[in-house]
Image (spheres, grey):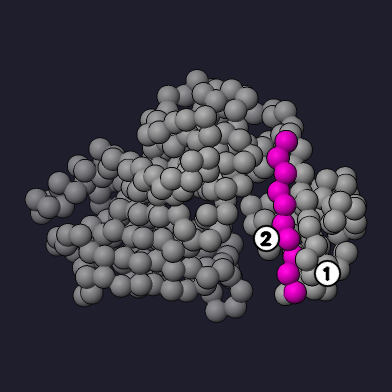
Amino acid sequence: MANITLTTTEQDIGVRLDKYLSHRLTDMTRSYLQKLIKENQITVDAQPVKANYKLKSAQTITVTIPPAEESEIVPEDIPLDILYEDADLLIINKPKGMVVHPSAGHSSGTLVNAIMYHCKDSLSGINGTIRPGIVHRIDKDTTGSLIICKNDESHICIARQIKEHSVKRIYRGIVSGNLHQVSGTIEGNIGRHPIERKKMAIVTKGGKPAVTHYRVLEQWKNTTHMEFCLETGRTHQIRVHMASIGHPLLGDMVYGSSKNPYKLKGQALHAMTIGFLHPRTEEYMEIDAPLPEYFKQLEKRLRNGQ
């Protein structure tokens, strides 16, 4: 069980409690917060209140997160490429093709199945029984570094850093075509595609702000090896942003060409570096995930003009 304490300011006067909490605690859904309010797990100045309670200045809000419910997900003995581990965190190098958490059509073989076997009962429960320990995600066919939180305190700390955009996230990718600029920034709100609802897109109305910084590492004939630094972490952000400027990732059959001459299984994208303040020691740590073999072989082929 974990407790979160928040203090309101003059800017919060008149704001509904559930709305205030959904803005402050972005890793929890509004419906989950409303459920906690109904169960008196959230108090204002030590008193239970309703979700529509209007806040005043200098009030103390206490959020009690109950222990995680027992999961029906089956732990599976799936090998993990562990980059770092201690009592609070596990950082793994996710392979291509592995789904992060169970969903329709993916009830087993996911990262959650694997970490439940590895960590046993040591996983945060804030994201519910389907996503224990998961504080952020990368796509099924994106490889690389991913933080797993072993307790709620670590989860809260890492989630806060992600919200404040203080987590360093560096990706490597290979895109179609050659860029005229060796570095730059792509900005554009990302939301659901207005017609193809399974896709994301840069939208003019709604969506969430997204910022991707990029630089060219090496250019070959009609392809480019690039580095991306994420200021935000929206769904499919790099894939959508690069496609928007006419340079989709190689192998990206969703946002790029339907042709796949390199016979890639999904986009050529790797979450290489992740840096953050350790939730217990508060010391900055940075972990690198080595490039996967398929990426290095693709790089070699392109460099040789194949």
Say which element carries label 1.
loop
Q: Tell me the SS state at disc 2.
A: helix
* Magenta residue check for 9: yes
Q: Is residue 40 left or right of residue 24?
A: right
Tell me if 63 is positioned left or right of 189 in this view.
right
| Residue kind at label 1, given as amino acid type | Lys
Q: Amino acid at mark 2?
A: Arg
First in residue order: circle 2 vs circle 1 = 2
Q: Which residue position holds label 1?
A: 56
The image position of residue 100, as x and y in percent, is 52, 40
**Picture residue at 23% right of the left edge, 64% below the top:** 216
Does residue 222 appear anywhere in the picture?
yes
Q: Which of the 4 image quarters holds residue 257?
A: bottom left
> Where does the image place residue 278, in percent across and percent down from the top left?
48, 43
Above or below 117: residue 290:
below
Determine which residue is flagged by label 2.
Answer: 24
Q: Residue furthest top?
A: 77
Along the line of sight, the residue nearer the viewer: 32 or 164: 164
Query: Residue 252 lies in magenta, yes or no?
Result: no
Work out whether 185 lies above or below 160: below
Query: Whole-percent x and y of residue 298?
Result: 21, 46
Asked if residue 193 can be seen in this view, the reply is: no
Mark 2 and mark 1: Cα distance apart in space:
16 Å
In the image, which residues are magenta? Answer: 1-10
Q: Position of residue 134 (x, y in %)?
A: 57, 41
Q: Nearer the viewer, residue 140 or 197?
A: 140
